[in-house]
Image (spheres, rainbow, N blue to C red):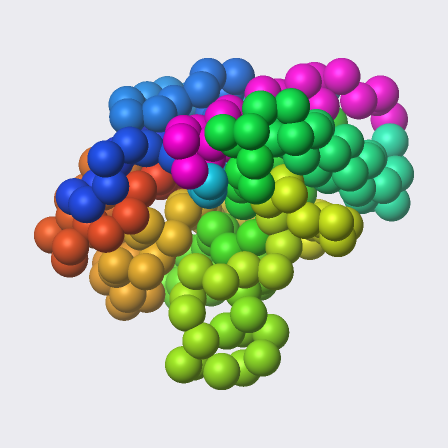
Amino acid sequence: MKIIYDAASDMGCVRSNNEDMILIDRSFLRDESASGEVLVDGNSRFCAIVADGMGGNNGGEFASDIACQEFDSWINDIPSKLTHGEIRAKVNEFVLNTHTLINCKGDEMEEFSGMGTTLVGIFFYEGSSYWVNIGDSRIYIYRDGILRQISRDHSMRNLMNNPELPANLIYNSLGSGTGTDSFADCDNIPLFENDCILICSDGLSDMVDDEKLALLLKQYAPASAYVSSAKAAGGEDNISVITLSIYK
């Protein structure tokens, strides 16, 4: 399988710093972009991750950085020949360990207290592909002209089915200083020729509707076009985008 990827992370039009972080092909991006292609076979490990940090005094930047660094180590260090069930168990271990690490770092440094981050993305492990989600960042698939959100937003608005609740009020994240456990939605996702994957922070999905996202995916638009669309709509938050085009 060949994957052509394009990624960009931008501060947006309102925020004074960028708390998002992208992990793509073992590279970490903030306020920059990258593109390339990778061949994935039965021995390959590859991931594309977006983390949207939160917390004052640059705590969100620190939290999203930790999450991406830890995921990069995790995907490259887990044993070979794991079953689907064992992979999901390893994901749960990653979540517990990273959630604890971020909270401990926040406890050690008062200025970072309460910092946390979302994490969403896709990873390839020895011939199989999986998606993972913690929080309200999103992963979509565009297949046969139809856009579908794969992830489920861990937001109070979604949980309570109440559109009047603030969109950014989430009940699940890595860190955030909460005493509750964090969890991940994770599952295997078969991919086919001409599938397109979109991974993004809510700085894109809150600013650009699904119809526009589908059009951009149909056009194989670069990540910068998604960023530009979000900024044209107000750019109220940091914007991070990864697109993956799948070729067999």
Going by the picture, which residue comes out furthest to the front? 110
Q: Main secondary structure of the magenta part?
A: helix
Quarter-of-image position of residue 6 = top left
Q: Position of residue 57 (x, y in %)?
A: 40, 31
Quarter-of-image position of residue 13 = top left
Residue 32, visible in the rendered structure: yes
The N terminus - image quarter: top right
Q: Is residue 66 magenta?
A: yes
Span of residues in magenta: 56-81
Q: Position of residue 248 (x, y in %)?
A: 52, 35
Along the line of sight, the residue nearer the viewer: 139 or 28: 28
What residue is drawn where x is 65% and y is 30%? 107
Note whether 97 is above or below 121 in the view shown.
above
Note whether 168 is above or below 79 in the view shown.
below
Q: How many marks?
A: 0
Q: Is residue 40 magenta?
A: no
What residue is drawn where x is 11% and y is 52%? 232
Q: Position of residue 106 (x, y in %)?
A: 61, 31
Q: Position of residue 112 (x, y in %)?
A: 52, 31
